[in-house]
Each structure stands twice: as structure tokens, then as C-alpha cells.
Amino acid sequence: MDDRTVRMALERHWEASDASDFEREHDIYRDDAVLDYPQSGERIRGRRNIQQSRMVQPNKKRFTIQRIIGAGDLWVTEFVLTYDGVPSYTVSIMEFRDGQVVHETQYFADRFEPSPTRAHLVEHADGTSSR
């Protein structure tokens, strides 16, 4: 599978995730895929178990993709995952085998206020000045 095809599969996956289309969302995974959540210490084995874990999640979710980057069998997606209106800044690392995800690791981070001690050194991510 070439990089363009993988990128298109990832775009379909994240669009389906945002739409809560659980069937299409999980087409990208191999039957024996593994999903790790290091912050909670959870590991979910198997495409159907990964799908079920997401289907039983009661929160209203939205996915806003910031960037997809990768090549070959390793791809990273940075996105904002909003649960019930609260954003979590997320990184998904996907490893592919034979055109499907065999392993995914997701990292989550909450928003925090910038430190005033470095205000003179930074700009806002939207390009505006801190001063």
C-alpha cells in the first residue's frame, strides 16, 4: 500500500470517528490489532474489542485533525478529541502491516495555561504575539 493510499485510509478513519460511524471507523484495523492507552495502562486486543470499547463510550465525541504525517508502515495523527465539549490534545501513532493497522498507541493531554515566565519568548499557535 503506497503512502497516498494510507493517508486516504486515515482520512476516512478520522472522518468516520467524528461521525460515530463505528463500522467504517474500524475498517482500518487488522482483526488482531492492539490498541494501547499508556496513560490509563489499558491494552485492548482485537478489532472487535477496540470497536466495542468505543461504542460503549457514553460521551459525545468530536475529532478535529491537526496533522497527519508518516510514511510506509508508521503514521502519526495529531488531533483534538473533544469529549462533551472538553478538548483533549491527542496523538495517535499507528503501525501498519499489509495495509491495515496492527498497533495503535494514543496519548492524551489536557490544555494548560502558558507560563508568564516565558511570555517574551513565545507566540500563540495562531501566530499572534504574546505581548
Image (cartoon, rainbow, N blue to C red):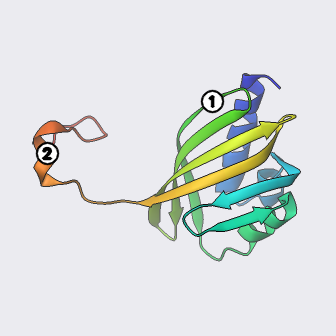
Q: Is residue 118 depicted above or below 17 in this figure?
A: above
- Of residue 34 and residue 90, the one placed in the foreground of this image is 34
**Which disc number belongs to residue 119?**
2
SS under mark 1: strand
Percent position (x, y) of residue 114? 22, 54
Reading the image, the residue beneath label 1 is: 70
**Which of the 4 image quadrants contains residue 57?**
bottom right
Taking the image as shown, residue 79 lies to the left or right of residue 8, namely left
What residue is rendered at 57% in x and 59% in y?
Answer: 62
Task: Say which amino acid is labelled 1.
Answer: Gly
Percent position (x, y) of residue 54? 72, 67
Mark 1 Cα shell of 10 Å, populated few (<14), some (14-19), many (≥20): some
**Farthest residue in the right direction?**
31
Mark 2 Cα shell of 10 Å, populated few (<14), some (14-19), many (≥20): few
Task: Say which amino acid is labelled 2.
Answer: Ala
Taking the image as shown, residue 56 lies to the left or right of residue 123, namely right
Quadrant of image for the C terminus? top left
Do labels 2 and 1 touch, CB within 8 Å? no
What residue is rendered at 62% in x and 68% in y?
Answer: 41
SS under mark 2: helix
What residue is rendered at 26% in x and 34% in y?
Answer: 127
Percent position (x, y) of residue 111? 36, 59
- Of residue 45 and residue 15, the one placed in the foreground of this image is 45
Quadrant of image for the N terminus? top right
Q: Is residue 100 visible?
A: yes
- Of residue 48 and residue 93, the one placed in the foreground of this image is 93
Alpha carbons under labels 2 and 1: distance apart: 32 Å
**Which of the 4 image quadrants contains residue 10?**
top right
Q: Is residue 15 visible?
A: no
Q: Is residue 2 depicted above or below 130 in this figure?
A: above
